[in-house]
Amino acid sequence: MGGVDVGGGGGGKRKSLDSDINMIPMIDLLMVTISFLLITAVWSHMSRINADAQVPGPPRPDVEQEKVEPEKQLHVMMQTEDKFVLVWKQGSTTVDQIDVPRKDVTIHAGNQDVIRFPDLAVKIESEWKAKGQHSNPTDRKLDQAILHTDNKTEFRYLIGVIDAIYQTHRDMNLGSKIEKMPAFNITFAVN
Amino acid sequence: MPIANPGRRLMRHVGLEFVAKKVAGGGHRSTNAALSLTSMIDFLVVTVVFLLMTFSASGEVPQAKGLVIPKAENALDMIDAPIVSVVQRQILVDGAPAGNTNSVIETDRMQRIDELFNMLKAKRELWKQTHPNKDFPGVAMLQIDQNIPAVVVKSVFQTAAFAGFPNVSFMVDKLPQSGAH
């Protein structure tokens, strides 16, 4: 038996403050807790990659529409097999255009092949550092990336490119603390 | 004659050596071993603490059968939202059939999938009725097989946006961070 001293120790006829813990129910409780936690454990942790369809709200007739200068947007084009094309556009005006040679890196994770584009991620990060518009930690708005793809590209390649775009992080002030957040918000080109 | 200690005499008549050794207490070590209670309780407590720390009350996200989710590194935690699954040519919304992708694949053109649109719109209306004083978050989770072509992904994405779910997330299996940043 294990003993627990709960303090005290005054004299007289008071009952002893030392009490014993019965080991058998204690071990039973631990075993039952372990069994329950093992049975209900979730071993596969799913996550999500965010995308925003950028649907504008309906115009409000009571509010006068301000003329806002369009922001720079990064268009990531993956229609060709040998390269990515990064195009910075402001409205319909092309600001800059860079070709990034396409190098698919396949890594084996479990029984699955994962496609990654580390060169593209590095290039996008350097591009954002040079031309990104929302880098101040107090600015809650994100720069916009638009993904252009052909119809045949498999979903895992799209996720590889989206993952490369989301690799660029920046500091964002979320009230009480500053956190690392993705620098871009991603959507798909319609065409 | 001095009195001698009699010693063991039990089962002497049995002519088997191993029986005599067993009776005499010699031979192999006992098969019973004592457990150290302190170490055992320490181990059990550490196991309980580890399992409690990794415990997830939100439970497992249901995954459609035959679906292989792509893996990604820069992923966010899951949130509660309707799950649109695309397995081969079948579309499911929270496990219930919501059309197929036959017309999208056959025409190879991005288009609205009407059955999916109606089902998502009904979900949106239901949410608005049950939460009358709240803004609709418009979040949907797309659970798409890694080999599905982009035209289907874009069609489902666009249909969800048209049905009032512009904040779309793609479900991925999280890869450990490689330390690239």
Image (cartoon, coloured by chain):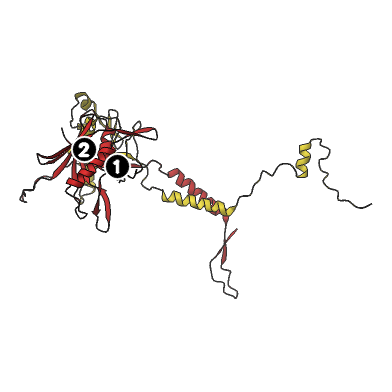
Chain colours: A red, B yellow
- Looking at the image, the residue that sits furthest to the bottom is A12
| Residue A15 occupies quadrant | bottom right
Residue type at mark 1? Arg
**Depicted B77 relative to depicted B159: above or below:** below
Is residue B97 in view?
Answer: no
Q: Look at 38% across and 48% down and name the residue there.
A: B57
Query: Label 1 belongs to which residue?
Result: A48
Look at the numbered disc 2 and give the secondary structure of its residue. helix
Mark 1 — on which chain does it sit? A
- Looking at the image, the residue that sits furthest to the top is B106
Residue type at mark 2? Ala
Mark 2 — on which chain does it sit? B
Query: Label 2 belongs to which residue?
Result: B160
Q: Residues within 10 Å of mark 2 (few under 14, many from 20)?
A: many
Q: Residues within 10 Å of mark 1 (few under 14, many from 20)?
A: many
**Residue B135: x and y, percent?**
20, 49
Of circles 2 and 1, the one toward us is 1
Instruction: Pick whichever, B75 or A58, lies toward us.
Output: B75
Is residue A75 in view?
Answer: yes
Instruction: Pick whichever, B62 or A52, lies toward us.
Output: A52
Image side of residue B10 versus residue B133, left or right = right
**Depicted B132 relative to depicted A91: above or below:** below
Q: How far apart are the two marked residues, 2 and 1, measured between alpha carbons?
A: 16 Å
